[in-house]
Amino acid sequence: MEDAKKPGIQQPADGNPAANAAAEGHACSCHLPHAEIDTLEIPDEEILYDLADLFKVFSDTTRIKILYSLMNTERCVADIAAAIGASQSAASHQLRILKQARLVKFQRDGKNVIYSLADAHVYTMLEQGMSHICE
């Protein structure tokens, strides 16, 4: 089988498509146009690091359970712990991580601390994630 030669492109002696792509300035040998790659704007490294950290917070099922328990109502630590089947200490530890990630907010009510989702974005992230895995 003979490879079709592209006009203006020097074919490597062995007909290797990957070497040909490299000669064109591309790192692959696919048939897709590569003009968009040059104009793609990847966010700054610091922002990507923060985004990766945010997604790491979603990597723990206990934290996901806490977020789901707060989707429709505010709760105190004792109620959260009961809802997810964990100790209050474990729930508090995970809530601290969720607060640092700005996924939950809290308000004091006397001696109690009442937690809720930080904003509608958290609800959206959970719904989008669930939609994605259930497709």
Image (cartoon, grey):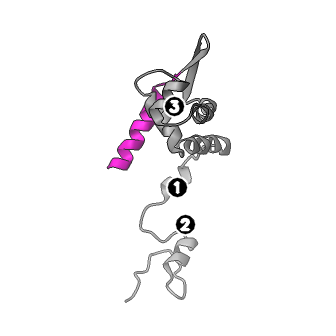
Q: Residue 38, how many percent across, how many down?
A: 55, 54
Q: Main secondary structure of the magenta part?
A: helix
Q: Quadrant of residue 56?
A: top right
So how many labels did they put on this image? 3
User: 10 Å neighbourhood of mark 1: few (<14), some, or many (≥20)?
Assistant: few
Q: Secondary structure at mark 3?
A: helix
Q: Secondary structure at mark 2?
A: loop
Crowd rating for badge 2 (residues with CA inside 10 Å; few <14, some 14–19, many 20+) = some
Determine the residue positioned at 55% across, 43% down.
55
Task: Please state which amino acid type lies under the numbered disc 3.
Answer: Ala
Foreground pick, 131 / 70: 70
Which residue has dot 1 on it? 37
Residue farthest to the left, as pictured:
135
Per the rendered image, the range of residues in magenta is 115-135
Where does residue 23 sit, x and y in percent of width and height? 57, 73
Q: Label 2 sits on what residue type?
A: His
- Distance Cα–Cα, label 2 vs label 1: 10 Å
- The reply to whether callout 2 and callout 1 are in contact (CB within 8 Å) is yes
- Which numbered circle lies on residue 26? 2
Which residue lies under the disc numbered 3?
Answer: 81
Residue 113 or residue 130, whichever sits in front: 113
Q: Position of residue 103 (x, y in %)?
A: 55, 30
Residue found at x 57% / y 72%: 22
